[in-house]
Image (cartoon, grey):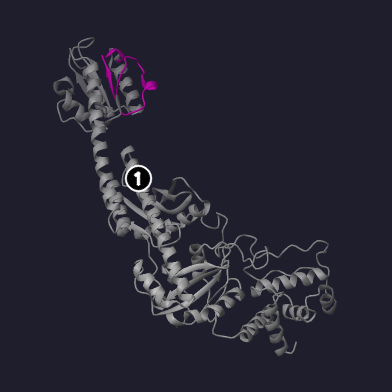
Amino acid sequence: MVSLAQLSAELGASLHRAVPGTVPGVQLSGVHVSELEDPTAYLEGGELLLTTGIPLGGTAATASAYVQRLAARGVAALGLGLGEGLDSVPPALIEACAGEQLELMVVPDGVPFLDVSRAFWDLAGRSGQADLIAGLGTQTALARAAMRPDALPSVVQGLAQALGGWAAYLPADGGAETIWPIGSAALLPHLREETGRLNRAGAHSAATFWLHGSPVVEYPILVGRRIEGFLAIGSGRTVTKADRQIIMTVCVLLALKAQQHEELTGTSAVLGSAVAKLIVRGHVEAARLLAADVGLGPLPERVRMLAARTEDGDLRALAVNVAGLPAEDGAPGPGAALAVCRLRFAEDGLGFFLLDTADLVPVAAPEPEEYDGGLLPWEGGPAAAGGSPSGMTGNAAQAEPLPAGTEAGGAGQAEPLPAGTAAGGAGQPAAGSPRTGAAWTEPVALADAASQTAVLRRAALQAPAGRLVGTAGDEDSRADRWADSLAGYQRADLLGAVAAYLRRRGHWEDTARDLAIHRNSLRHRIAVAQRLLGVSLDDPDTAAHLWLALRRRGL
């Protein structure tokens, strides 16, 4: 923008103060000429209003009223042109402008108002060009920063410095955030909350919210139609058009880096998959040679093999789901080791991961961040967005609808599902909970991995949904654990129902008659048992081992 001081300096004696002194640097939105008594309907505020003095009316009262109207409208300055109606500045006008703190300028006789307007727009053009050059310089610097090895921190820092505020990048997958300056890190918990809400909503446009009394704008970083992360900005000043161009440049740079990373990851995944398949098929030396040739580096000497059920073969999503699964023995799960695992592949409905034992060292949880800024949590947090503290949807733990033809309260009344399962198809856990079962081996030498594949595959296929089981035990001990799970279910006699069902070889009528319950209630109990165990009772191997376990219990 152009200031009054700049315009006066440009025009020299053609525009000066009515009262000697320094011309203030008030910003001008434009130059307007009017001889109306009340021109405010045609003004927006911030203008230099030029007049020959006709609206002043010749009296102190009319001059004062005129100045008051201009000040109320937010006019930046009044310019009085001499020679056409007035040869000097009326003292009453000087007094009125001083009283309203309205800057009074003089255009001497013989200086056309057009000269003032032309000078203003010349300055505005040069100012815009300077802003453009500065903006291009900033964008060039940011593009260079994006080429550095530490591209993300460099770009975020450059953007924050360009805007005179702070900036943060928050990955959509919940990974580590990048923020600058570091002193703004206390804002991250609140930014995570907002980012989670936007990610759940799938917002593909910028969103603004208030944080600690200041506006924050979040821009989604997209690769195709998928959100990779969010760029959050707290500017230290009013954002200009040039600032918005810089922000858009950063969004494009971050999207390109994300796409680059995705392509590199895809290439690495293909190579890692080939190496992993060689290992599990017993060709370890060939795997070592291939890994060295394609730049994967030396292979680990000891690994824990992990397999998990998958419907679509998306190993990235599978790793996220499995990372949080509780281990059967209460030991720490794979955690972040899955995210960095390069030796992975999908085959026959299972995803396999060969985890370096060095990556499985438990990491101490960081100290909680403290923030004493007094900011209350956003009222429309996860609960308001349709979620719950546990991440389950509202119907996640509700009972399955009664089968057709069954009366509520009658013999066919259905029992609730186990906590954490949804009223969906068999074996499908609730929304927001892990969607698969998994199994993993004890640490083994890389050369011995192939010998563990068959037992790992069988254990993963039979693992309960939402659980990570080991392979150390045999089939009988696993069946004993299934029996314990059935016996521990409190809402219905699942143990007796399953024993009767297996005894009658899956005949519904005979089993229901033995238990003296309605056939539909039996069907529901068997469905609940299968969801609880994550297996099918119609599988001959499963049925055989479970039946022997039940017989050992005297059933």
Classify residue 547 as left or right of residue 380.
Answer: right
Q: Where is residue 485 in the image (x, y as percent from the top left)?
A: 65, 80
- The residue closer to the viewer here, 66 or 240, is 240
Name the quadrant of the N terminus.
top left
Q: State which region is magenta.
A: 31-55
**Residue 328, placed above or below residue 102:** below
The image quarter containing residue 387 is bottom right
Secondary-structure class at tag 1: helix
- The residue closer to the viewer here, 469 or 262, is 262
- The residue closer to the viewer here, 457 or 171, is 457
Under mark 1, the amino acid is Ile
**Residue 425, placed above or below residue 257:** below
Please check the rendered image and state whether residue 38 is part of the magenta-colored stretch, yes or no. Answer: yes
**Residue 74, placed above or below residue 405:** above
Residue 363, can we see it? no
Q: Which residue is drawn at 79% across and 70% down?
A: 521
Q: How crowded is mark 1: few (under 14 residues within 10 Å), some or many (20 or more)?
A: many
Q: Where is residue 34 in the image (x, y as percent from the top left)?
A: 32, 16
Please check the rendered image and state whether residue 242 is part of the magenta-colored stretch, yes or no. Answer: no
Name the quadrant of the C terminus.
bottom right
Residue 346, can we see it? yes
Q: Mark 1 points at which residue?
A: 247
Classify residue 9 as left or right of residue 36.
Answer: left
The image quarter containing residue 499 is bottom right
- The residue closer to the viewer here, 308 or 321, is 308
Q: Position of residue 104 (x, y in %)?
A: 23, 24
**Residue 97, placed above or below residue 210:** above
Q: Residue most toward the top?
A: 84
Q: Position of residue 300 (x, y in %)?
A: 38, 77
